[in-house]
Amino acid sequence: MDIRNYFGRKRSRLEETSNLPRISSSTNTVDAQVDSQSESNSVKVLSTSTVSMNELEDLPKKGEPIKQTVLTQYPKTKDRSFQASWFHEYKWLMYSVEKDAAFCYACMQFKPSGMKDVAYTLSGFKNWKNAKDAKRGFPRHEKTGSHVEAMIMWEEKKNRQTSNTEISTLVNDKTLEKHRYYLKSIFEVVQFLVINELSFRGSYDIDEKAERGLFIKLFEFALKKDRFLAECNETIPNNGKYTSPEIQNEIIQIMAESVRESVVIDVMKSDVPWFTLMEDGTKDKNNRENIAIAIRYVKEGKPRESLLNIITTKELDAKTFTEKTIETLRENSIDLSRLLSQCYDGANVMSGKKGGVSGLLEQHLNRKIPYIHCFNHRLHLVVVKAVSDNDSLRDFFDMCVMLHEFFHHPKISSLYEGQTIVRLLPQRWSGHFAITKVVSSNYSEINRVLDQVVTQSTLFNGEDRAKSIGIKTVIETEEFRFCLIFAKKFLGLLHPADAAMQSRTASLKVGLDVVKSVLQQLQVMRTSQKEFELILEDANKLIPMIESTNNTMSKRKIKTSEHPSYITETRLPSYSANHAIDGDLQNSKMKLKQTYNECLDLIINEINRRFSDNQELVTAISRISEFKTDNMNVFKELGLKVPSEEELAVVKNFLIQREAQTDDGTRLEVLFRFREAFLETYELMAAVETFGCSTATCESTFSTLTAINRPQRLSMSHARMADLVYLAFERHRTSALNIDVVLRKFNDRKNRKLALYQVT
């Protein structure tokens, strides 16, 4: 097109537009170009009150009242035009003669934060055909959150002007309440998911073009059940829904910080200022090192253990661990001078007296801090030593591993009706005890299945049948049966000690008492011939079970295969054949007795060796439990105050009387209620309870970590994963979070798109 023609056409359009009536910016009257009849009949100005940011001359400036221009006839576009009757339906509506477009007075005056709809504030609405359409026109604009907020501001403005009150905010309490209710509902969905260790996001649905995660689905379910929440949701702008992954992470982080603050408050308000530091580490599926840092203290007469944080580091040396530990304690305003003891596993990086974390912490604080090797780890080392150094027990547990693998196959497991033969866990000695109990209680059923595999040649190949024959031959030997009953016996004696030290309240004193009790019973077993005879008798009772199974199988008609079966070679534990066929019962009994004595001697010696450290501290703890003041130098060196003999004598008599009258809790709980009278004794006994004996609290977090760090969630960052593990592990604190406090913290972090509180 020729440029002259272009400007010619543009000029003609401008001339046509100039013939339309105009509103003067200064007089609210029709422009001089309009004749007197039009001036008298076609224009009326309806006024109420308030503000404008539009640059058009015929629209109100900021602070001016609303101008609703009523014409007898409006310009038509495709046989459609603006209608004056719309002013009565929509009080916020304005018409611009200059643009032949409709505007929203409230949105132009107040412009709520996050508003994106410019049709009613800048360009103007001109789609007259769909003006009253619920999805495209004025009704849709009325339902938007920004418009509702603007209307509330407008109404608030008028109310305050009428009552001559100061305007501290343009958003009234009802709107803020709706915003808070909406956000709190999102927080509660997050709270539910983290407590139950559930994932937030799921797979992406191509058809719906949306995530099918639990977070969105659970929130949608809440919208269906909660009418008020659904009403609040309708007024929230799309860019302020607060459901994005980034907001989820921020909420999770704030919740974790709030839970950690509650832990720190409990530590600071503990009965005595002392605490024990506990640490343990593990690698997750992303091969990242996770270090769980926990703290033990006494509050309201009860020892407590709480997780403080889960940190990570690429450097796995003692110096880095020490620096990270000190940094964590200082970040949480915990006074390192009140560190009473430290409890870790036996790894050199942690336990080293000079180069380990325990030694480096002592050097940093320039004072003695007793190191306590975790009792659970010690028991595990005792069992591992006993099993690995005794040939009969080692072969027995090798066969248990083979049983698990064999019965794990689908065809074999379909025949088996007993308890699941669990996998032997090398990291925890409790795995030895678990598999021993299962094999013992399901011994007859295991034999039945093995016989069935051998006879059903049509279902099982030669390799399966060969393995079945070999396993059955071994588990029917007297040596295997004896080891089965014997292992169940001595591991059962160790189990109470492990269970007691898994508790988050078990102290060093309790751990020592339990280990002492176990050791005494093991010594009784070692010196008692009767105990050996009882174990042998129980092992022989398994023989009728075998004979019963064999008789049952012999009565059945065995179908022979038309094809020759091929027996493949299989590796079985080495057992002396003389136990099965020799018939020399006396020699067999002597060998079993030798296995019995060697194993018990090994366990007793290992317990004595591994639980023999910190003797000075152990002696002092035992003396204070007897209310005696001798051998208390270690307490004084640690900065603890020792009460007088007179006070201890009175406390002892007082507790004896209380225990005789009623069962009102532990000694520490009783003294807590009467601590004003026996303050020094209570503080010392509370400090004694602060000494921990295991890192069970730290280890328990790794079970939570395994549940959360599933293969589908490996892409999450360590910070998010650590916070999720922390909130799930401390679920009782997470459940008790004050959502209003969390919401306030969320609001104070940055300027939010949704106003939540009055501006002061």
Image: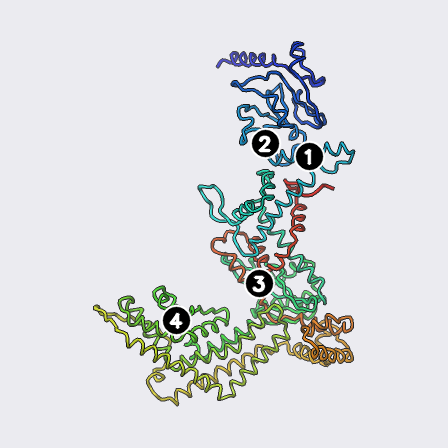
Circle 1 packing at 10 Å, graded few (<14), some (14-19), many (20+), is many
Query: Mark 2: which secondary structure?
Result: helix
Give the numbered dot on residue 550. Answer: none
Does 566 appear above or below 593?
Answer: above
Disc 1 marks a residue whose amino acid type is Met
Disc 2 marks a residue whose amino acid type is His
Whole-number angstrom distance, CA of label 4 to CA of label 2: 71 Å
| Lower sequence index among marks 4 and 2 | 2
Q: Are marks 2 and 3 in contact (CB under 8 Å)?
A: no
| Lower sequence index among marks 1 and 4 | 1
Q: Which of 722 and 134 is in front in this view?
A: 134
Mark whose residue sits in front, 2 or 3 = 2
Q: Name the residue under label 4.
A: 403
Q: Nearer the viewer, residue 350 or 207?
A: 207
| Lower sequence index among marks 2 and 3 | 2
Image location (x, y in percent) of residue 337: 71, 65
According to the image, what is the colour scheme of the structure?
A: rainbow
Can you say which quadrant of the picture contains the C terminus? top right
Q: Do the residues labelled 4 and 2 touch (CB within 8 Å)?
A: no
Give the numbered dot on residue 317. Answer: 3
Mark whose residue sits in front, 1 or 4 = 1
Image location (x, y in percent) of residue 130: 53, 26
Query: Mark 1: which secondary structure?
Result: helix
Disc 4 marks a residue whose amino acid type is Leu
Give the numbered dot on residue 153. Answer: 1
The quadrant where residue 734 appears: bottom right
